[in-house]
Image: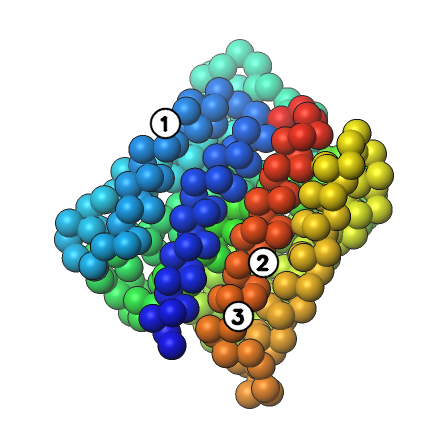
Protein backbone atom coordinates (compact mmCIF):
# COMPACT_ATOMS: atom_id res chain seq x y z
CA UNK A 1 0.00 0.00 0.00
CA UNK A 2 2.78 2.42 0.86
CA UNK A 3 4.20 1.97 -2.65
CA UNK A 4 0.94 3.29 -4.10
CA UNK A 5 1.02 6.20 -1.65
CA UNK A 6 4.52 7.17 -2.74
CA UNK A 7 3.48 7.12 -6.39
CA UNK A 8 0.60 9.47 -5.56
CA UNK A 9 2.96 11.72 -3.58
CA UNK A 10 5.43 11.79 -6.46
CA UNK A 11 2.65 12.83 -8.87
CA UNK A 12 1.66 15.62 -6.48
CA UNK A 13 5.27 16.79 -6.15
CA UNK A 14 5.75 16.76 -9.93
CA UNK A 15 2.63 18.87 -10.47
CA UNK A 16 3.62 21.35 -7.78
CA UNK A 17 7.23 21.72 -8.95
CA UNK A 18 6.34 22.17 -12.61
CA UNK A 19 3.20 24.30 -12.31
CA UNK A 20 2.22 25.66 -8.90
CA UNK A 21 5.59 26.98 -7.73
CA UNK A 22 6.73 28.69 -10.97
CA UNK A 23 3.30 30.25 -11.46
CA UNK A 24 3.31 31.35 -7.84
CA UNK A 25 6.74 32.93 -8.19
CA UNK A 26 5.29 35.23 -10.86
CA UNK A 27 3.21 36.74 -8.07
CA UNK A 28 6.29 37.65 -6.00
CA UNK A 29 8.11 40.93 -6.64
CA UNK A 30 11.85 41.40 -6.87
CA UNK A 31 14.55 40.97 -9.51
CA UNK A 32 16.19 38.10 -7.60
CA UNK A 33 12.99 36.06 -7.64
CA UNK A 34 12.40 36.89 -11.31
CA UNK A 35 15.91 35.71 -12.21
CA UNK A 36 15.44 32.42 -10.35
CA UNK A 37 12.06 31.87 -11.98
CA UNK A 38 13.62 32.18 -15.44
CA UNK A 39 16.02 29.30 -14.74
CA UNK A 40 13.46 27.24 -12.83
CA UNK A 41 12.59 24.64 -15.43
CA UNK A 42 15.81 22.67 -15.82
CA UNK A 43 16.51 22.09 -12.10
CA UNK A 44 12.84 21.38 -11.37
CA UNK A 45 12.60 19.08 -14.40
CA UNK A 46 15.63 17.08 -13.30
CA UNK A 47 14.14 16.77 -9.82
CA UNK A 48 10.89 15.45 -11.29
CA UNK A 49 12.78 12.93 -13.42
CA UNK A 50 14.55 11.68 -10.29
CA UNK A 51 11.19 10.80 -8.73
CA UNK A 52 10.72 7.94 -11.17
CA UNK A 53 14.18 6.42 -10.90
CA UNK A 54 15.50 3.95 -8.31
CA UNK A 55 17.06 5.59 -5.27
CA UNK A 56 20.82 5.94 -5.31
CA UNK A 57 23.72 8.36 -5.80
CA UNK A 58 23.00 9.12 -9.45
CA UNK A 59 19.31 9.70 -8.77
CA UNK A 60 20.14 11.89 -5.80
CA UNK A 61 22.58 13.89 -7.91
CA UNK A 62 19.74 14.84 -10.26
CA UNK A 63 18.11 16.74 -7.38
CA UNK A 64 21.16 18.83 -6.52
CA UNK A 65 20.48 21.65 -9.04
CA UNK A 66 17.01 22.02 -7.56
CA UNK A 67 18.44 22.03 -4.04
CA UNK A 68 20.78 24.85 -5.04
CA UNK A 69 17.93 26.71 -6.71
CA UNK A 70 15.80 26.59 -3.57
CA UNK A 71 18.79 27.65 -1.49
CA UNK A 72 19.09 30.71 -3.76
CA UNK A 73 15.37 31.33 -3.29
CA UNK A 74 15.81 31.23 0.49
CA UNK A 75 18.74 33.64 0.13
CA UNK A 76 16.45 35.96 -1.85
CA UNK A 77 14.03 35.80 1.08
CA UNK A 78 16.82 36.76 3.46
CA UNK A 79 17.81 39.69 1.23
CA UNK A 80 14.18 40.79 1.03
CA UNK A 81 13.91 40.68 4.82
CA UNK A 82 17.12 42.68 5.19
CA UNK A 83 15.94 45.36 2.77
CA UNK A 84 12.49 45.54 4.37
CA UNK A 85 13.97 46.08 7.82
CA UNK A 86 16.58 48.56 6.63
CA UNK A 87 19.57 46.36 7.52
CA UNK A 88 21.18 46.68 4.11
CA UNK A 89 20.75 50.46 4.17
CA UNK A 90 22.42 50.71 7.57
CA UNK A 91 25.21 48.45 6.32
CA UNK A 92 25.77 50.78 3.38
CA UNK A 93 24.94 48.12 0.77
CA UNK A 94 22.23 50.24 -0.83
CA UNK A 95 21.37 53.93 -0.52
CA UNK A 96 17.72 53.28 0.18
CA UNK A 97 16.03 50.05 1.19
CA UNK A 98 12.95 49.73 -0.99
CA UNK A 99 9.78 49.60 1.08
CA UNK A 100 7.32 46.99 -0.27
CA UNK A 101 4.44 48.93 1.30
CA UNK A 102 2.50 45.81 2.31
CA UNK A 103 1.30 44.89 5.82
CA UNK A 104 4.10 43.22 7.75
CA UNK A 105 2.13 39.97 8.30
CA UNK A 106 1.80 39.63 4.53
CA UNK A 107 5.52 40.25 4.14
CA UNK A 108 6.26 37.56 6.73
CA UNK A 109 4.09 35.12 4.82
CA UNK A 110 5.93 35.89 1.56
CA UNK A 111 9.29 35.30 3.25
CA UNK A 112 8.00 31.97 4.52
CA UNK A 113 6.82 31.01 1.04
CA UNK A 114 10.26 31.73 -0.42
CA UNK A 115 12.14 29.84 2.30
CA UNK A 116 10.06 26.67 2.67
CA UNK A 117 10.93 25.00 -0.68
CA UNK A 118 14.49 24.61 0.62
CA UNK A 119 13.21 22.28 3.36
CA UNK A 120 11.25 20.27 0.82
CA UNK A 121 14.22 20.13 -1.55
CA UNK A 122 16.52 18.95 1.26
CA UNK A 123 14.10 16.13 2.04
CA UNK A 124 13.89 15.31 -1.67
CA UNK A 125 17.65 15.06 -2.09
CA UNK A 126 18.03 12.86 0.98
CA UNK A 127 15.12 10.61 -0.03
CA UNK A 128 16.35 10.17 -3.60
CA UNK A 129 19.84 9.34 -2.35
CA UNK A 130 18.33 6.88 0.12
CA UNK A 131 19.75 8.77 3.10
CA UNK A 132 17.79 8.84 6.38
CA UNK A 133 18.01 12.59 7.01
CA UNK A 134 17.81 13.24 10.78
CA UNK A 135 16.86 9.58 11.12
CA UNK A 136 13.51 9.94 9.34
CA UNK A 137 12.29 7.04 7.22
CA UNK A 138 12.43 7.55 3.47
CA UNK A 139 8.65 7.47 3.10
CA UNK A 140 8.34 10.25 5.70
CA UNK A 141 10.88 12.31 3.77
CA UNK A 142 8.85 11.82 0.59
CA UNK A 143 5.75 13.16 2.34
CA UNK A 144 7.80 16.07 3.68
CA UNK A 145 8.68 17.13 0.13
CA UNK A 146 5.01 17.54 -0.75
CA UNK A 147 4.06 19.20 2.52
CA UNK A 148 6.65 21.97 2.41
CA UNK A 149 5.89 22.83 -1.18
CA UNK A 150 2.10 22.92 -0.78
CA UNK A 151 1.61 24.10 2.81
CA UNK A 152 5.01 25.77 3.02
CA UNK A 153 5.12 27.64 -0.28
CA UNK A 154 1.64 27.76 -1.77
CA UNK A 155 -0.44 28.30 1.36
CA UNK A 156 1.91 30.98 2.69
CA UNK A 157 1.92 32.82 -0.64
CA UNK A 158 -1.88 32.70 -0.96
CA UNK A 159 -2.25 33.87 2.64
CA UNK A 160 0.02 36.82 1.88
CA UNK A 161 -1.93 37.77 -1.23
CA UNK A 162 -5.28 37.43 0.52
CA UNK A 163 -4.04 39.46 3.48
CA UNK A 164 -2.89 42.30 1.25
CA UNK A 165 -5.98 42.23 -0.95
CA UNK A 166 -8.57 42.12 1.83
CA UNK A 167 -7.10 44.88 3.98
CA UNK A 168 -5.42 45.30 7.33
CA UNK A 169 -8.12 43.76 9.53
CA UNK A 170 -7.46 41.17 12.24
CA UNK A 171 -8.66 38.22 10.16
CA UNK A 172 -6.33 39.13 7.30
CA UNK A 173 -3.41 39.44 9.71
CA UNK A 174 -4.37 36.12 11.34
CA UNK A 175 -4.31 34.33 7.98
CA UNK A 176 -0.90 35.76 7.10
CA UNK A 177 0.57 34.93 10.52
CA UNK A 178 -1.02 31.56 11.30
CA UNK A 179 0.00 29.85 8.07
CA UNK A 180 3.77 30.49 8.53
CA UNK A 181 3.55 29.83 12.28
CA UNK A 182 1.59 26.61 11.80
CA UNK A 183 3.99 25.36 9.13
CA UNK A 184 6.99 25.94 11.37
CA UNK A 185 5.32 24.31 14.40
CA UNK A 186 4.45 21.28 12.25
CA UNK A 187 8.14 21.13 11.32
CA UNK A 188 9.06 21.25 15.01
CA UNK A 189 6.56 18.47 15.62
CA UNK A 190 8.54 16.18 13.33
CA UNK A 191 11.28 16.29 15.94
CA UNK A 192 9.34 16.85 19.17
CA UNK A 193 6.37 14.55 18.78
CA UNK A 194 2.79 14.18 17.56
CA UNK A 195 1.36 16.54 20.20
CA UNK A 196 3.44 19.45 18.90
CA UNK A 197 2.51 18.52 15.34
CA UNK A 198 -1.16 18.64 16.36
CA UNK A 199 -0.66 22.18 17.69
CA UNK A 200 0.97 23.15 14.41
CA UNK A 201 -1.81 21.55 12.38
CA UNK A 202 -4.39 23.45 14.42
CA UNK A 203 -2.67 26.80 13.91
CA UNK A 204 -2.10 26.07 10.21
CA UNK A 205 -5.73 25.04 9.75
CA UNK A 206 -6.93 28.24 11.42
CA UNK A 207 -4.78 30.33 9.08
CA UNK A 208 -5.83 28.46 5.97
CA UNK A 209 -9.51 28.62 6.89
CA UNK A 210 -9.14 32.34 7.41
CA UNK A 211 -7.47 32.68 4.02
CA UNK A 212 -10.18 30.57 2.40
CA UNK A 213 -12.98 32.60 3.95
CA UNK A 214 -11.40 35.92 2.96
CA UNK A 215 -10.92 34.61 -0.57
CA UNK A 216 -14.58 33.61 -0.78
CA UNK A 217 -15.94 36.72 0.91
CA UNK A 218 -13.69 39.51 -0.32
CA UNK A 219 -11.53 38.39 -3.26
CA UNK A 220 -13.91 36.20 -5.29
CA UNK A 221 -16.65 38.85 -5.71
CA UNK A 222 -14.12 41.29 -7.17
CA UNK A 223 -12.89 38.88 -9.86
CA UNK A 224 -13.49 40.28 -13.37
CA UNK A 225 -14.82 37.10 -15.01
CA UNK A 226 -16.67 33.88 -14.28
CA UNK A 227 -13.68 31.59 -14.80
CA UNK A 228 -11.55 33.44 -12.25
CA UNK A 229 -14.41 33.43 -9.76
CA UNK A 230 -14.80 29.67 -10.28
CA UNK A 231 -11.10 29.08 -9.66
CA UNK A 232 -11.20 31.15 -6.48
CA UNK A 233 -14.34 29.37 -5.29
CA UNK A 234 -12.80 25.96 -5.96
CA UNK A 235 -9.63 26.91 -4.12
CA UNK A 236 -11.60 28.14 -1.09
CA UNK A 237 -13.98 25.20 -0.85
CA UNK A 238 -11.26 22.59 -1.35
CA UNK A 239 -9.13 24.29 1.29
CA UNK A 240 -11.93 24.19 3.84
CA UNK A 241 -12.52 20.48 3.27
CA UNK A 242 -8.94 19.26 3.06
CA UNK A 243 -7.88 21.00 6.24
CA UNK A 244 -10.58 19.11 8.14
CA UNK A 245 -8.83 15.95 6.98
CA UNK A 246 -5.43 17.32 8.02
CA UNK A 247 -6.67 18.26 11.46
CA UNK A 248 -8.42 14.93 12.00
CA UNK A 249 -5.28 13.05 10.95
CA UNK A 250 -3.04 15.04 13.29
CA UNK A 251 -5.55 14.56 16.13
CA UNK A 252 -5.68 10.83 15.47
CA UNK A 253 -1.90 10.51 15.41
CA UNK A 254 -1.60 12.39 18.71
CA UNK A 255 -4.47 10.72 20.58
CA UNK A 256 -5.07 7.37 18.92
CA UNK A 257 -8.56 8.33 17.75
CA UNK A 258 -9.73 6.77 14.45
CA UNK A 259 -8.52 8.63 11.38
CA UNK A 260 -7.81 8.06 7.71
CA UNK A 261 -4.70 5.99 6.93
CA UNK A 262 -1.83 7.75 5.24
CA UNK A 263 -2.74 6.27 1.86
CA UNK A 264 -6.16 7.83 1.87
CA UNK A 265 -4.70 11.10 3.17
CA UNK A 266 -2.33 11.24 0.20
CA UNK A 267 -5.12 10.43 -2.26
CA UNK A 268 -7.59 12.93 -0.78
CA UNK A 269 -5.89 15.69 1.20
CA UNK A 270 -2.69 15.63 -0.85
CA UNK A 271 -4.14 15.52 -4.35
CA UNK A 272 -7.00 17.92 -3.60
CA UNK A 273 -4.68 20.44 -1.98
CA UNK A 274 -2.20 20.34 -4.85
CA UNK A 275 -4.82 20.63 -7.61
CA UNK A 276 -7.95 22.12 -6.09
CA UNK A 277 -6.30 24.58 -3.74
CA UNK A 278 -2.77 25.13 -5.02
CA UNK A 279 -3.05 25.06 -8.80
CA UNK A 280 -6.51 26.66 -8.94
CA UNK A 281 -5.39 29.27 -6.44
CA UNK A 282 -2.26 30.48 -8.20
CA UNK A 283 -4.00 30.40 -11.60
CA UNK A 284 -6.79 32.56 -10.20
CA UNK A 285 -4.38 35.08 -8.69
CA UNK A 286 -2.50 35.30 -11.99
CA UNK A 287 -5.79 35.99 -13.78
CA UNK A 288 -6.59 38.74 -11.28
CA UNK A 289 -3.49 40.57 -12.51
CA UNK A 290 -2.79 42.03 -9.09
CA UNK A 291 0.60 43.69 -8.50
CA UNK A 292 3.28 41.26 -7.37
CA UNK A 293 3.67 41.18 -3.62
Disc ID at residue 265: 3
Q: CA distance from mark 3 to mark 2?
A: 10 Å
Spot occupied by residue 202 in the image (x, y as percentages of width and height): 65, 67
Residue located at (48% from left, 61% from top): 187
The image quadrant of residue 63 is: top left
Spot occupied by residue 157 in the image (x, y as percentages of width and height): 60, 41
Please indicate, yes or no, whether residue 173 appears anywhere in the rendered image: no
Spot occupied by residue 229 in the image (x, y as percentages of width and height): 76, 40
Residue located at (42% from left, 35% from top): 73
Local SS, label 3: helix
Q: Looking at the image, tell me whether mark 3 or mark 1 is earlier in sequence order.
A: 1
Q: Is 70 above or below relative to 258?
A: above
Local SS, label 2: helix
Q: What residue is shown with label 1?
A: 39
Q: Looking at the image, tell me whether mark 1 or mark 2 is earlier in sequence order.
A: 1
Q: Looking at the image, tell me whether mark 3 or mark 2 is earlier in sequence order.
A: 3
Q: CA distance from mark 3 to mark 1?
A: 33 Å
Please state which of residues 283 and 210 is positioned toward the viewer in this rendering.
283
Q: Is 51 above or below relative to 225?
A: below
Q: What residue is shown with label 2?
A: 272
Q: Residue furthest left?
A: 57
Amino acid sequence: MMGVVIVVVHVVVAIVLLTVVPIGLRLVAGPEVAALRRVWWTPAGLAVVSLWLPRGPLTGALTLPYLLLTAALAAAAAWRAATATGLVRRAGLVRRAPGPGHPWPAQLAVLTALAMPLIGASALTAERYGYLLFGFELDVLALTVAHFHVAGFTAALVAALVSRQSGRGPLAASAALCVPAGTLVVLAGFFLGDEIELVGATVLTAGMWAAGWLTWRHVRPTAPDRRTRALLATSSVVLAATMVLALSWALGEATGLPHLPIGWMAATHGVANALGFGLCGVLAWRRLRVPAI
